[in-house]
Image: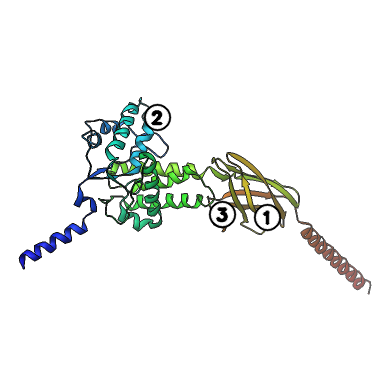
């Protein structure tokens, strides 16, 4: 009976471990982020890890074996690819890792060629935390990670979201979690109208903020850097704010929409005045070519003089806000004709009433 119990425990343990542990060793190729969201590298520390004597170099610069499973963070491989061409460092120093990065990539392809390769979710995020904050985004991290790793290695790889390959938990604070969620939502809104590979990559890179590999200092650094980069990306599609002086009861005012993305976008523009002093028209299916500006003519009908503000909002086909609205300040010094006729008529009536009252007084005095 005792032997049977031991056998059952062994079988259960065997079945619940990832498949590779039953057939060979597991090699994990992961590292914290080094490249900022604006493109430059925080430092050149990754170079030392890629050398034959470095932590990542020791994984690939050794006799090639089979019967292994390589678990790889595609974001790390993308960083190494970025180092194979001219790259810049945030501190302005001269980069030194181009040849080292190239050699490491070549050796990684050789070492993994006859082995199984598992692509982690892009950026190696804490899966449990990602499921809590953004389950749909986690699925895209897996699909994008697989796509990028297959491109880098030139072969098919596996992606197993339920395989238990991700390990560790992130220490991301509640404040930084909110920052991550706000940035993710901003990029998700923007992607409703902007079909850009750069935007897809930016969304995927947010997964690095959830990585267990980041220490406290790196979590703060990259979270702040991501927020700034996201703001810069969102600002690529915008409406210019402005102040307008209106001197006629009906006018067409120029409103400038700017698209700095490298793809065309089609948007709606909703014009909402905050008061009833004016009536304005909105726009539908406005095409803004890549890297260009387009001037729209906003029709304004003045109802009453004075100052008011119009919120100009870029929306998608469903009417959902894409980027923060621009504020257009309108200052009208004219009176609508209907108001003029009304006030003139009222003045005439008052005058007639005054005349009638004067006539009655004269008659009373005569009697």
Establish if 12 lies above or below 97.
below
| Tag 2 residue | 85
Locate residue 80: give its quadrant.
Answer: top left
Locate residue 135: give its quadrant.
Answer: bottom left
Mark number, residue 62: none
Nearest to viewer (mark 3 / mark 2): 2
- Asked whether residue 179 is in view, the answer is no
Mark number, residue 316: 3
Establish if 353 lies above or below 275.
below
Q: How far, Cα to Cα, is label 3 from label 2?
A: 38 Å
Picture coordinates of residue 84, whole percent (x, y) = 37, 30
Element under disc 3 = loop
Is residue 41 shown left or right of residue 261? left
Picture coordinates of residue 144, whole percent (x, y) = 40, 48
Q: How many marks?
A: 3
Quarter of the picture containing the C terminus is: bottom right
Identify the residue at image location x=24%, y=33%.
Answer: 61
1 or 2: tag closer to the N-terminus = 2
Nearest to viewer (mark 1 / mark 3): 3
Picture coordinates of residue 226, whole percent (x, y) = 40, 43
Locate residue 363: give its quadrant.
Answer: bottom right
Element under disc 2 = loop
Q: How far, Cα to Cα, is label 1 from label 2?
A: 50 Å
3 or 2: tag closer to the N-terminus = 2
Identify the residue at image location x=18%, y=57%.
Answer: 14
- Residue neighbourhood size for the residue with mark 3, other residues' Cα within 10 Å, grouped as few (<14), some (14–19), many (≥20): many
Mark number, residue 281: 1
Identify the residue at image location x=17%, y=61%.
Answer: 12
Nearest to viewer (mark 1 / mark 2): 2
- Asked whether residue 34 is in view, the answer is yes
Who is closer to the viewer here, 208 or 50?
A: 50
Who is closer to the viewer here, 157 or 284?
A: 157
């Amino acid at each position: 009976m005792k032997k049977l119990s031991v056998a059952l425990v062994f079988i259960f343990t065997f079945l619940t471990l990832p498949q590779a542990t039953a057939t060979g060793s597991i090699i994990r190729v992961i590292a914290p982020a080094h490249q900022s969201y604006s493109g430059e590298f925080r430092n050149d520390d990754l170079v030392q890890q890629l050398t034959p004597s470095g932590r990542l170099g020791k994984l690939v610069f050794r006799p090639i074996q089979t019967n292994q499973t390589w678990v790889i963070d595609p974001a790390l491989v993308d960083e190494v690819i970025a180092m194979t061409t001219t790259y810049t460092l945030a501190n302005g120093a001269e980069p030194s890792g181009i040849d080292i990065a190239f050699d490491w990539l070549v050796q990684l392809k050789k070492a993994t060629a006859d082995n199984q390769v598992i692509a982690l979710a892009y950026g190696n995020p804490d899966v449990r935390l990602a499921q809590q904050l953004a389950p749909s985004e986690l699925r895209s991290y897996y699909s994008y990670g697989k796509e990028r790793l297959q491109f880098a290695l030139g072969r098919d790889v596996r992606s197993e979201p339920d395989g238990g390959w991700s390990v560790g938990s992130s220490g991301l604070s509640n404040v930084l979690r909110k920052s991550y969620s706000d940035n993710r939502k901003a990029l998700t809104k923007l992607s409703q109208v902007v079909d850009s590979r750069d935007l897809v990559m930016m969304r995927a890179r947010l997964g690095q903020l959830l990585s267990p590999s980041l220490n406290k200092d790196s979590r703060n650094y990259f979270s702040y850097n991501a927020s700034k980069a996201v703001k810069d990306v969102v600002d690529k599609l915008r409406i210019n704010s402005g102040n307008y002086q209106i001197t006629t009861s009906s006018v067409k005012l120029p409103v400038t929409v700017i698209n700095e993305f490298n793809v065309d976008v089609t948007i709606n523009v909703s014009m909402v005045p905050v008061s009833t002093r004016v009536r304005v028209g909105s726009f539908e299916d406005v095409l803004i070519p890549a890297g260009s500006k387009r001037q729209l003519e906003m029709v304004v009908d003045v109802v009453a003089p004075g100052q008011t503000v119009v919120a100009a909002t870029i929306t998608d086909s469903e009417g959902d806000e894409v980027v923060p609205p621009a504020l257009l300040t309108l200052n009208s010094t004219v009176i609508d004709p209907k108001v003029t006729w009304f006030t003139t008529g009222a003045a005439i009536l008052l005058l007639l009433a005054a005349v009638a009252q004067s006539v009655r007084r004269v008659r009373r005095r005569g009697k």
